[in-house]
Image: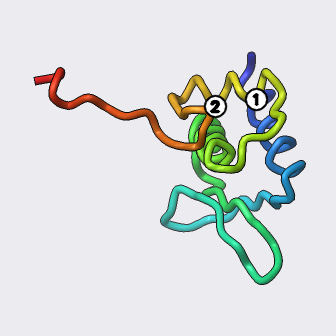
Amino acid sequence: MRKEKKLKLLEGAISDRGYRVRYEKGSFIGGDCRLRDHNIVVINKFLPLEGKIYTIAKVLSRLEPGELPAEVQQIIDEFGFSSIGQLPLIDTESQR
């Protein structure tokens, strides 16, 4: 799947959950926040597509698990985010 399509799918999924996506410039990567009564995902507009996709996937992975389309869940899983909203544990003992 093309990166542009992945980004559009994730933008749609996050919008369906009541979030607004804003692309801004600054010295940050991005994330979610609450501004007054609005849930917002702010993304650095100078990030490459992969960074924008990663940021939205990270926010979606932390939200209450709902009925995400299979394509969206697959994108989230590609980045290693678990479906229960937490990053997978890394076993540092076995890596030594």
SS at mark 2? helix
Residue 76's disc is 2
Residue 78 in percent (x, y) is at 58, 23
Instruction: Answer left or right for 29 relative to 60.
Output: left
Residue in view at x 55 percent, y 32 percent: 82
Residue in view at x 65 percent, y 69 percent: 33
Quadrant where the image shows the C terminus: top left
Q: Quadrant of residue 7?
A: top right
Residue in view at x 60 percent, y 52 percent: 46
Residue 20 in percent (x, y) is at 82, 61
Amino acid type assigned to the residue bearing label 2 in the image: Ile
CA–CA distance in space, label 2 to label 1: 6 Å
Instruction: Answer left or right for 86 relative to 75.
Output: left
Outermost top residue: 1
Residue 46's disc is none
Amino acid type assigned to the residue bearing label 1 in the image: Val
